[in-house]
Structures are given as structure tokens and as C-alpha cells.
């Protein structure tokens, strides 16, 4: 296992991830990069889809290092020392290479890279997990190592764990709603349970299950006979920054003779509005004093009752609680606005009668 941390000699010229530009992050199991032409094929597809950073699984390269490619692209790779198996790498565009702060070739299944961004550094952990049928010890070792890597990342960083994680998390959103979205596929397997537990323990979300796409764009792997498809490649993203990840989907047009699809995520840095720059909106007070009049109070109660009765027929029996609350709140405010209106602000004389008398 290699754990040497390498830093860039040159200082980054620009911040890579900002609020003004979108970043494309790809992840792809390419099956092998041992063939001479395979690297060129991958680079061609990456340039065509305009991807800034690509996490690549199953490269099968020996050792670790930084390989310069055409058009200013660079490949940081981490593999086994003497066996052509597994292997992971991160392919970077020229802009991404200039913004890279450090990279760590952990072992043949994990590589860590860190980039300079405008608000919190971007830490990317590219992975290639053991299959669901692998030995339990091998799977435990993988997650122990992955946990140790993530634990060392500064807590203010935007964390992204990505790659072929060989895990089916399924479509059961209720299993762990704070981690999983409603758009997963199929059933969860043993590796899926391990991945969900890991995400939950590290405050990450499995972001690919949160976006509604056609099923063909959710599948990440298809068997050679074309009969079986699964969603086993995933992207885990910091919960705090989850709204900055706009989309994750597969592109079947990218072809390098791999049974995995090229997956692409779009990231656009989104910051919370600050109190200083955005004053909180205040609700104008309703003129509830009108309810002292019995006729006005009766008409208000009647209108509210009619609206709620109509609303009850619109809502589904198992409607989302948040959606129900928003409907009720909106209806209540509409009736208040129509029947009572808003309280008019009384002008207060800044000079009292007593002051006028004294003058």
C-alpha cells in the first residue's frame, strides 16, 4: 500500500470551483488501460463531453505516478505494485491540473486528490470497491482504508467519494432517507448496505439517487449479453454542499468497449444567502381586530371551512407532510388576506402635544 502524499510544485493560478462556473465531474470503469490505444480513446471521449475531472476505475496500471497526456491533460494513477489488477486514476483537464493542491496514491483501489476552490477546497476520492461476491475481509479492509482517508480530509472541504463502488443501493428511499433519494434502481445488496452505512457515518449523500431520469440513464453497468443492467457506480457528496451538485446521469454514447457507462455530474457552487446581504423578509401583520365583529368572524370561519374541505379532496391519502403543510399554510393566508386584509401602520407624531404647548 502506498500512502505518500504529493503536492504540486507550482501555485494554482485560479480557483477551480467557483459560483460563476460549472464543473463537470465524470466517473467511469474502463475495464483496462493496458492497451496502448485505450488511454487515447478515453481522452477523446472526455474532451468530447467537456469533462474537467474524471475518476477512472480498473486501470490495471502498475505502481503510481503522474502521466502527461495530449492537450495539457494529466493522469494521476495508483495501482498494484506487481499485479495488473484493479487500479484507479484521476484524469484532469489543464485547468484542473493547475488547481490541484495535492494527490495521494493510497492503494490499487483508492486515490485521493484535492483542488483549490473559491469556498472550501474540493476533495475527490476515486474508488474501485470489491464486488458483492468478494471475501468479507477484503470488503472490510476496503471500507476501513476508505474511512481512514475520508477522516483525514479537512472538515471544511467539499467531499466527493466517487467511482465503481460495486453496490446496489436500491429504490427503497425509506431505508435511509437522509442519505438516499427516491430515484434509485432495483433492490439493495450487501455492498449497498455497507455503502449507505459509510455515507451516513460521514455525512454524505448518494447523490445519483436524487435525480429523476429515464432508467437507461440511471444504469451504470450492463452485462455482455445485454440482459442485465445495474446501478453500481455512485457519487457520494457532502450533505452540506448537496445543492451544489445539480445532476448525475449516464451517457451511453461514450464508447471505449467497456460494459460500464460514462457517468457525468454537474457541480455549480451554491452558497447560502447571508444575513448581511439578504435581509430576512417579514410577514405583514393581518388585521385580526376585524374578528371582533361577529358577522366578519362568521364569514371568515365559513370561508376557511369551505377552503379546507375542498383542499382535503385534492390531497392524496399519503401525501408528503411538507407538501400538506405548505398547502394548508397557503390556504389559511389567502383567506386572511381576502377577509381581513393587512393592518395599516398608524403614523405616530414625533412631536407630542405637550411639546407643542411648551413651545
Image (cartoon, rainbow, N blue to C red):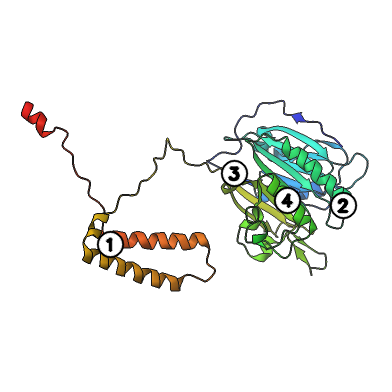
Q: Earlier in the sequence, mark 2 or mark 1?
A: 2
Where residue 36 sits: x, y (%)? 85, 47
Q: Taking 352 as reference, is 186 above or below it? A: below
The Cα atoms of the two marked residues, 4 and 3, are separated by 18 Å
Seen from the viewer's position, the closer of residues 281 and 114 is 281
Determine which quarter of the picture holds residue 261. Answer: bottom right
The Cα atoms of the two marked residues, 3 and 2, are separated by 32 Å
Seen from the viewer's position, the closer of residues 349 and 20 is 349
For the residues labelled 3 and 1, say whether their Cβ atoms are less than 8 Å apart: no
Q: Residue at x 57, y 35 (%)?
A: 119
Where residue 5 sits: x, y (%)? 78, 31
Q: Which residue is mark 3?
A: 240
The Cα atoms of the two marked residues, 4 and 1, are separated by 50 Å
Query: Which label number is shown at residue 136?
Result: 2
Q: Earlier in the sequence, mark 4 or mark 3?
A: 4
The Cα atoms of the two marked residues, 3 and 1, are separated by 40 Å
The Cα atoms of the two marked residues, 4 and 2, are separated by 16 Å
Q: Earlier in the sequence, mark 4 or mark 2?
A: 2
**Secondary structure found at label 4:** helix
Q: Which residue is mark 4?
A: 197
The Cα atoms of the two marked residues, 2 and 1, are separated by 65 Å
Determine which quarter of the picture holds residue 115. Answer: top right
User: Is any atom of residue 202 visible in this view?
Assistant: yes
Which mark is in front, 3 or 1?
1
Q: Which residue is mark 1?
A: 338
Query: Which label number is shown at residue 222?
Result: none
Seen from the viewer's position, the closer of residues 317 and 76 is 317
Amino acid at each position: 500500500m502506498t500512502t505518500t502524499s504529493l503536492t504540486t510544485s507550482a501555485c494554482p493560478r485560479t480557483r477551480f470551483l467557483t459560483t460563476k462556473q460549472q464543473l463537470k465531474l465524470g466517473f467511469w470503469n474502463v475495464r483496462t488501460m493496458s492497451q496502448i490505444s485505450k488511454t487515447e480513446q478515453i481522452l477523446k471521449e472526455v474532451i468530447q463531453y467537456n469533462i474537467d475531472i474524471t475518476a477512472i476505475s480498473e486501470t490495471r496500471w502498475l505502481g503510481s505516478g503522474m502521466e502527461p497526456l495530449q492537450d495539457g491533460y494529466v493522469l494521476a494513477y495508483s495501482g498494484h505494485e506487481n499485479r495488473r489488477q484493479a487500479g484507479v486514476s484521476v484524469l484532469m483537464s489543464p485547468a484542473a491540473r493547475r488547481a490541484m493542491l495535492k494527490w495521494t496514491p493510497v492503494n490499487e483501489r483508492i486515490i485521493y486528490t484535492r483542488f483549490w476552490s473559491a469556498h472550501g477546497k474540493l476533495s475527490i476520492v476515486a474508488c474501485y470497491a470489491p464486488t458483492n461476491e468478494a471475501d468479507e475481509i477484503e470488503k472490510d479492509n476496503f471500507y476501513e482504508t476508505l474511512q481512514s482517508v475520508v477522516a483525514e480530509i479537512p472538515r471544511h472541504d467539499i467531499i466527493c467519494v466517487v467511482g465503481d463502488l460495486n453496490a446496489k443501493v436500491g429504490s427503497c428511499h425509506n431505508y435511509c432517507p437522509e442519505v438516499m433519494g427516491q430515484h434509485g434502481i432495483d433492490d439493495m445488496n450487501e455492498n449497498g448496505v455497507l455503502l449507505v452505512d459509510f455515507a451516513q457515518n460521514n455525512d454524505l449523500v448518494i447523490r445519483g439517487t436524487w435525480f429523476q431520469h429515464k432508467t437507461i440513464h440511471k444504469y451504470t453497468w450492463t452485462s455482455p449479453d445485454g440482459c442485465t443492467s445495474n446501478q453500481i457506480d455512485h457519487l457520494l457528496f457532502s450533505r452540506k454542499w448537496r445543492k451544489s451538485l445539480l445532476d448525475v446521469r449516464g451517457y451511453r454514447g461514450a464508447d471505449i468497449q467497456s460494459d460500464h457507462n460514462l457517468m457525468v455530474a454537474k457541480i455549480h457552487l451554491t452558497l447560502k444567502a447571508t444575513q448581511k446581504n439578504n435581509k430576512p423578509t417579514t410577514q405583514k401583520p393581518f388585521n385580526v381586530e376585524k374578528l371582533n365583529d361577529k358577522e366578519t368572524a362568521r364569514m371568515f370561519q365559513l370561508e376557511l371551512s369551505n377552503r379546507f374541505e375542498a383542499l382535503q379532496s385534492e390531497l392524496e391519502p399519503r401525501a408528503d407532510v411538507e407538501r400538506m403543510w405548505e398547502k394548508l399554510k397557503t390556504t389559511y393566508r389567502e383567506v386572511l388576506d381576502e377577509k381581513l386584509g393587512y393592518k395599516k401602520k398608524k403614523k405616530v407624531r414625533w412631536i407630542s402635544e405637550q411639546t407643542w404647548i411648551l413651545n
